[in-house]
Image (cartoon, rainbow, N blue to C red):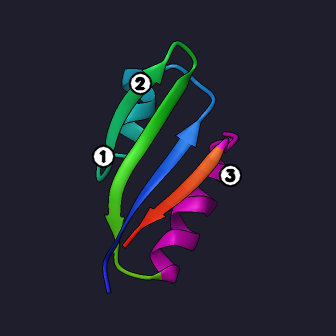
Amino acid sequence: MMRRYEVRLPYARSDTLAAAFPEFEVVQVAPAQTLLVGTLHDQVELHALLARIADLGLEISEIRQDG
């Protein structure tokens, strides 16, 4: 089942950040906060996303799942 996720990162949106996550909508929601918004099929895809964020040395402020 596909689920929509919002991953909040404590960084301003940049072209580099957007390019690192082309399958997500990358939205700046505050001066130093960006949301990655997208749909993942399963936990395997979620874990792959989290690993990619970690590999890039990025921090996560919050993860939300809808439906």
Q: Residue at x 32, y 49 (%)?
A: 24
Q: Amino acid at mark 3?
A: Ala
Three-letter residue code for mark 2: Gln
Judged from the image, the secondary structure of the residue bearing numbered disc 3 is helix
Q: How many marks?
A: 3
Q: Which residue is mark 1?
A: 22
Q: Position of residue 52 (x, y in %)?
A: 57, 56
Q: Residue 30 appears at what percent x and percent y?
A: 50, 18
| Residue at 66% from the left image edge and 39% from the top image edge | 58
Residue position marked by numbered label 3 in the rendering: 54
Q: Earlier in the sequence, mark 1 or mark 2?
A: 1
Magenta residues (range): 43-61
Q: Decide: is 9 above or below 16.
A: below
Q: Secondary structure at mark 2?
A: strand
Residue that appears at 60% across and 60% down: 50
Q: Main secondary structure of the magenta part?
A: helix
From the viewer's perspective, is 10 left or right of 2? right
- Label 3 environment density (alpha carbons within 10 Å; few <14, some 14–19, many ≥20): few
Residue 26, compared with residue 53, is above or below; it is above
Judging by the rendered image, the residue that carries numbered circle 2 is 28
Q: On the rendered image, what quadrant is the N terminus found in?
A: bottom left
In the displayed structure, would residue 13 be above or below residue 21?
A: above
Please report whichever mark, 3 or 1, sits nearer to the chain's N-terminal start: 1
What residue is drawn where x is 30% and y is 46%?
22
How many residues crowd around disc 2 within 10 Å: few (fewer than 14), some, or many (20 or more)? some
Label 1–label 2 contact, CB within 8 A:
no
